[in-house]
Image: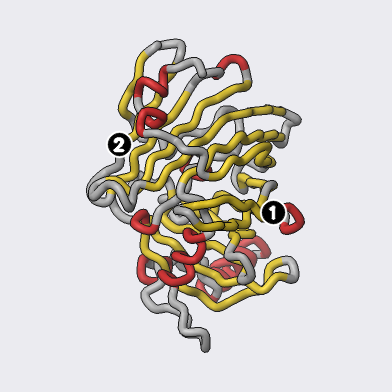
């Protein structure tokens, strides 16, 4: 009798307290935007984020990751980016990244040619195979870290739709909140990102990532104290951009994290078309 009564109570509790429903597509993807007195929508805020960027830059990045079981990995790579909006009708930008460390992936590299329409051209060069292959490199993990290549390649306006959400305060900083839904055909590993963008310089200080199963799997947090002003001349006029030099990516499912630091950044270094070629991808420089 006690057992039967317990089963009955459990069944009754389950009936009146059902499991929380899975969000529908309409609930997961915003269909309307938050309207604020400033009149800015998601597109406008995201455009300001992209304006806080040099048309071309050359960066050296370091990453240090730590796993739940004490595993550790140190990675260094060089990332170069160039905007092609003003000079090419078909191409938005090009990004090339190559490893310096660890030794087992040294000279491995990625090349992404971001197109205005259709799928991007994406290539990987693996020194062990001595061959360049066309693959989806956006989902490639950066060796032994919690970053995917998609997380470090500069995103473009055309990569997704942008929806403004209610503003929030993050670590005491007044921030815009924008949901980004990657466009079909973008080869993104994510179904949605939510960016928290500080209002003064339009720097993302927090980003949440949902995978294609609608599971929140990653959290990227920039260290506000590391936000630094970079200054250079662009198109004949002075330009300044603000960048967080240190951020931390947490993988919520794996219980691991990686700290990314910008070691060096050169703005508008006069990068040429040949610096974004398959030949450059195979170069040891």
Residue 237 percent location from the top left of the image:
51, 57
> Tag on residue 7?
none
Residue 67 percent location from the top left of the image:
69, 34
Residue where numbered disc 1 is placed: 228
Q: Which marked residue is nearer to the observer: mark 1 or mark 2?
A: 1
Q: Disc 1 on helix, strand or loop?
A: strand
> Tag on residue 121?
2
In the displayed orientation, state which residue is furthest to the bottom.
Answer: 37
Q: Tell me the quadrant of the picture where the N terminus can be found.
A: bottom right
Q: Quadrant of the rendered structure where residue 76 is?
A: top right
The residue lying toward the viewer, choosing from 212 and 91, is 91
| Contact between labelled residues 2 and 1, with CB atoms less than 8 Å apart | no
In the displayed orientation, state which residue is furthest to the front.
Answer: 236
Residue 55 percent location from the top left of the image:
46, 49
Residue 180 percent location from the top left of the image:
44, 62
Q: Is residue 260 visible?
A: no
Q: Residue at x 46, y 65 (%)?
A: 46
Q: Rate crowding at label 1 as few (under 14), some (14 to 19) or many (20 or more) other CA atoms within 10 Å.
A: few
The residue lying toward the viewer, choosing from 122 and 3, is 122
Q: Residue at x 49, y 66 (%)?
A: 48
Q: Is residue 260 above or below residue 131?
A: below
């Amino acid at each position: 009798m006690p057992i039967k009564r317990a089963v009955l109570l459990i069944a009754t509790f389950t009936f009146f307290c059902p499991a929380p429903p899975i969000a529908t597509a309409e609930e997961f993807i915003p269909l309307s935007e938050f309207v604020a007195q400033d009149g800015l929508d998601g597109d406008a805020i995201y455009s300001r984020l992209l304006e806080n960027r040099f048309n071309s830059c050359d960066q050296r990045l370091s990453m240090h990751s730590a796993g739940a079981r004490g595993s550790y990995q140190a990675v260094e790579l060089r990332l170069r980016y160039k905007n092609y909006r003003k000079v090419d009708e078909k191409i938005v930008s090009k990004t090339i990244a190559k490893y310096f460390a660890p030794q087992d992936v040294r000279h491995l590299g990625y090349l992404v040619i971001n197109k205005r329409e259709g799928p991007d051209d994406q290539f990987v060069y693996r020194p062990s195979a001595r061959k360049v292959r066309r693959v989806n490199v956006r989902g490639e993990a950066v060796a032994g870290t919690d970053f995917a290549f998609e997380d470090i390649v500069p995103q473009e306006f055309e990569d997704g739709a942008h929806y403004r959400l209610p503003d929030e305060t993050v670590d005491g900083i007044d921030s815009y909140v924008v949901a980004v839904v990657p466009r079909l055909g973008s080869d993104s590993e994510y179904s949605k990102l939510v960016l928290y963008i500080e209002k003064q310089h339009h720097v993302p200080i927090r980003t949440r990532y949902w995978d294609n199963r609608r599971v929140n799997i990653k959290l990227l947090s920039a260290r506000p104290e590391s936000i630094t002003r970079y200054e250079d001349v662009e198109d004949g006029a002075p330009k300044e951009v603000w960048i967080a030099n240190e951020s931390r990516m947490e993988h919520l499912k794996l219980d691991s994290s990686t700290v990314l630091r910008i070691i060096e950044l050169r703005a508008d270094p006069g990068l040429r078309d040949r610096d974004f070629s398959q030949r450059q991808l195979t170069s040891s420089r």
